[in-house]
Structure formats: C-alpha cells, structure tokens
Image (spheres, grey):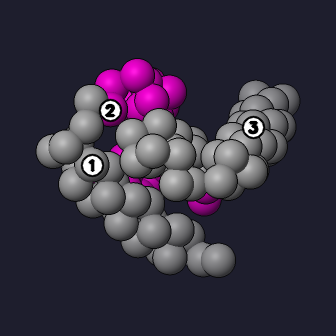
Amino acid sequence: MYKDEMIQLHQFLVYVLKYLENGYDIKDECEEYFSLNISPHHIHRTKAEHKYAIFVLSSAISEILARKEGNNLPPNVVNGLSELARRSRKEVVKMEARLEAK
C-alpha cells in the first residue's frame, strides 16, 4: 500500500472513531493512539509510523466494538489487530534505531 493510501485509511479510521465517540466513552481504549501524536494530517511522518497508528487505532476500535456491542466481534479479530500493532511497533523501533545510527 502506498503512503497516500495509508493516510486515507488513517483518516477513515479517525472518522469511525469520531462516530463512535458520540455513543461511547472511548478514552481508555484510545489512550495509546492518542499518545502517539500521529494524525492523518501529519504527512511528514513515515509510512511505517502511519501504519503503526492505523493498527493501534484499528485495535482500539475493535476493542470498543467488542466491549460495547455485546461481544458481537470475535475475540480473534481484537487479538489479531493487537498483534499487528505490536509487530508494527517493532518495525518503527527498528527504523528509528537505523536513523539514529546514521
């Protein structure tokens, strides 16, 4: 996926989060995403950083839906997205380490 497509997906997920914000208390589930301080408008951020933000946000949204909608979302979806976020974080850490080594 190209960086601009990732940014568009990131923006879409932010819209979903804003929609969910109207009906649910989302602060706890989204704490990690908010702490990243990466928004779709930060086009100077790397593709890996946006990818990580997308996975963290997707994971948060799935947790919100799983807890609030009577567990209609299978646990493997929530767990899978959390695992993808963890793997993506490793990629970002590796990239940052390479940049610092230069």
Q: Let me know if residue 57 appears in the view.
A: no
The amino acid type found where label 3 is placed reads Arg
- Specify whether 78 is left or right of 102: left
Picture quadrant where residue 96 is located: top right
Work out whether residue 73 or residue 58 is closer to the camera in this orientation and state it. Answer: 73
Disc 3/disc 1 C-alpha distance (Å): 24 Å
Q: Which residue is rendered at x = 60% and y = 77% of the image?
A: 2
Cβ–Cβ under 8 Å for marks 2 and 1: yes
Residue beneath disc 1: 20
Q: Which circle marks residue 86 in the picture? A: 3
Which of the two marks, 2 or 3, is nearer to us in this view?
Answer: 2
Residue beneath disc 2: 26
Q: Position of residue 84 (x, y in %)?
A: 74, 49
**Magenta segment:** 26-51
Q: Which residue is rendered at x = 32% and y = 32% of the image?
A: 26
Q: Let me know if residue 56 appears in the view.
A: yes
> Which quarter of the figure is the C terminus placed in?
top right
